[in-house]
Amino acid sequence: MVMRVTELGGLIGDSMSTVKRASFLLTLYIFSMLAVAAPAAAQNPTPTAAISVTCAPSNINVEVKPGSTYSGFTTCTATNPTAYQEKISINVQADGLATAAPGDMYVGASDSVDFQISVRATPYMRMDARTLSVSATVQEINGFPPANSASSNNNMIVNIMQYSLVQVEATEPFVQLMPKTDKIFEFKVYNLGNQLDFMKVGVTDTYRKTLEESGFTITLPAVKKQVDATPTPASVKSRSELLRPRVGVTHITF
């Protein structure tokens, strides 16, 4: 009986030793894994996103005169200085002008990508200067959302160019005059351009030559008038003297 108890005690002691040994080995394994993971994490930190955008030309001229394209362009370059591929989004603000640009694009590690921005004005738009803003924001780096916020912005000027267009009407298209008679002629001058302009109203050299060949002597000084670009015409008056050597009635059609 004593012998059986002794054997049972020996078995229990061996089992306890095995459990302790296993616990020790498990603890040692866990510590060794932590020791390996810490240096690995230190060697592979979370990548920092970065992007830069430059555009040229920085001044975009847009023609809006009749027959033009009403469009302008600039070329931008997105540069990724990091060691990882990035996905970026492009945002364009053009102060009321229509624009066309890519939405998202990928830029390789330490690489650059060119893209074009186009702006479009409305026909006959008034001369003006508008601000064009292009920004790029990093959405992903190495396939994951970036830990930091990274973006770049570039501002440019869009110049809506001036054009001139004029229309002249005589208030009296048909005039009947006696020889050696003074007459004040009145004209309606329409500025059909897109900005304030100066208009000169007078007799062209070709028409003056025609009158002189017909025996007329005409004095009609050219009148310079400042006219705004509005549907309302400006009134231009000019006193003229028409002299004809023969007696009779003089008819002039404008």
Image (spheres, grey):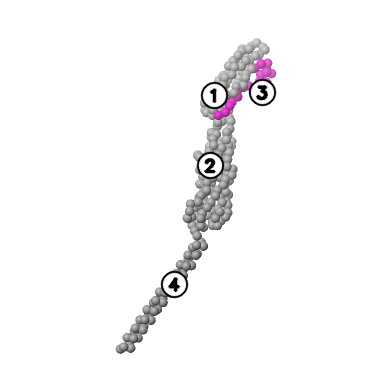
Which amino acid lies under the numbered mark 4 shown in the image of this protein?
Answer: Leu
Question: Does any portion of residue 239 appear in the rendered image?
Answer: yes
**Please, which residue is most extreme toward the right here?**
213
Mark 1 vs 4: CB contact within 8 A: no
Q: Which residues are magenta?
A: 196-218
- Foreground tag (4 vs 2): 4
Q: Secondary structure at mark 4?
A: helix
Where residue 14 appears, as percent x and y from the top left, is 38, 81
- The residue that disc 4 covers is 28
Mark 3 vs 2: CB contact within 8 A: no
- The residue that disc 2 covers is 132
- Foreground tag (3 vs 1): 1
Tell me if mark 2 has few (under 14), some (14-19) or many (20+) residues whose alpha carbon lies within 10 angstroms of its own: many
- The residue that disc 1 covers is 234
Left or right for 213, reference 132: right
Q: Nearer the viewer, residue 150 or 177?
A: 150
Assess whether residue 205 is covered by the magenta stretch: yes
